[in-house]
Amino acid sequence: VDGKKKTLAFSPREDIVAETAKCAGKERAYETCTLKKVHRHYFDRLWAPEDDKKLTAKAKVDWKAMNDEEAEDFLGYSTKHVKSLDEQALDKLKAKAKKKRMPLVVDVSFPWCSKCKDTRDMFEVAARKLHKKAYFGYVDAREERRLSRSFQTDCTHVCTYHVLPQGEAEFTEVEAKSGEKSSQFIKKLERHLKPALTAAKNIEAIRKAASKFGAAIVSTFHTAKHPQETLAMRKASMQFRDAAFMQLSDKKAAKALGGEEWVYAVMKKNKKVVLPFPRDQELTESNLIDFAKKAIAPPLTLDYTFEKRLPLEKSKIPVAKIYVKETMKNNDPFLSIIKRVSKKFQGRIATLVCSTEPYHMDMVDAGLPKDKFPAIAIHDKLEGRPPESLRYAYVAGVVADDFSEESVSTFYSEYLQGKLH
């Protein structure tokens, strides 16, 4: 300016990829600066609000980069139950939550994120419904960049909310999917509000937890005498929130489960089934999580679809595929037998009824005739082919009374005992 070189400094409003920054221009005329944002989205004001006045007087904005179709920025929640937070306000709210023994739920997101726009209505409904059970807050990830980085905020296909459960020091994450019902999201959120490992007063409390969560993983170990096992339970409970993890100290109630200090699973669908943790496995965090995943796997899945496949895949549980004709009705005597058997083996083998032609195509891989029904094959895991996933076929004619409850139960039992080849 007037033959003198001057430096104009400003703070980028968003995080940039420093190594891609390019600056160039004509001497004593103008200079251009090209910056790449870490989080890609439509045009946005480049600099921080406090730099706006001095920069607009010296720099020209390329308004052609504006995408007119971009929705307006999110300006905050309308309900009083969600507080807008900066670093200081979040620290105060965390301290208040700790003092009041309340959980804290926080939305840390970019105001322009289209995926989060789809799920914020659910978050607001949850805040209105659960405001007496938890505190709710919102952090503008664009304006509170340092705070955003501490939560590792990103814009992906899934919107993530952060929960600080009662009595815990670390946030956990709850995913919200576009198109999900508010009631489904609230149910997931509620699972994260309470402490991960809770005390069970009696068997009835365990059964209620099993009904709510899908299964209750219960330790009857004396916490002082078995600190290692108790720590493994606590760590597993914090990592896997889809099952209820409980500590039972009442000796009389513990006898009803198994009569000795151990870990047991009480099921949702069949509360009379008490499944002990495998005796040949070490009681570690990862093994307990695998045990919990199997416990919450649905014992019987009818009308198999892609959506119903996901819980079985996550559980890594062996799957018995029951191949039946498309014309078979749900009240068929054979399916009644399968339903009773599936309850007996809940948490150890999941049973899947394949009644449509596309799912009959893998019968040959399992060693079964492709057109003879009914038929059964137990797979080590739902997806995959030998040798990664071994399959064991139930062939008609092996026993005198094929497909009776006794013979099918024997087939399931022999699989678990490793007697099938």
Image (spheres, rainbow, N blue to C red):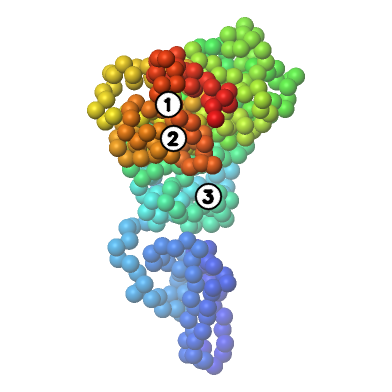
Give the CA distance from mark 2 to mark 3: 62 Å
- Residue that mark 2 sits on: 367
Give the CA distance from mark 2 to mark 1: 9 Å
Q: Position of residue 86 (x, y in %)?
A: 53, 49
Earlier sequence position, callout 3 versus callout 1: 3
- Residue that mark 3 sits on: 86
Classify mark 1: helix, strand or loop: loop
Callout 1: few (<14), some (14-19), or many (20+) C-alpha neighbours within 10 Å? some
In contact (CB < 8 Å): disc 2 and disc 1: yes
Classify mark 3: helix, strand or loop: loop
**Which residue is located at x 62 percent, y 20 percent?**
263
Left or right: residue 381 compared with residue 180: right
- Residue 186 sits in which quadrant? top left
Classify mark 2: helix, strand or loop: loop
- The foreground one among 160 and 237 is 237
Q: Which amino acid, mark 2?
A: Gly
In contact (CB < 8 Å): disc 3 and disc 1: no
Q: Where is residue 103 in the image (x, y as percent from the top left)?
A: 53, 33
Q: Which amino acid, mark 1?
A: Val
Callout 3: few (<14), some (14-19), or many (20+) C-alpha neighbours within 10 Å? some
Above or below, 190 against 124 in this view is above
Q: Residue furthest top?
A: 252
- The foreground one among 294 and 97 is 294
Q: How many numbered circles are shown? A: 3
Q: Where is residue 272 in the image (x, y as percent from the top left)?
A: 49, 12
Using the rendered image of the protein, determine whether residue 326 is visible from the camera's viewpoint.
yes
**Which residue is located at x 47 percent, y 61 percent?**
39
Quadrant into which the C terminus falls: top right
- Which label sits in the foreground, 2 or 3? 2
- Residue that mark 1 sits on: 395
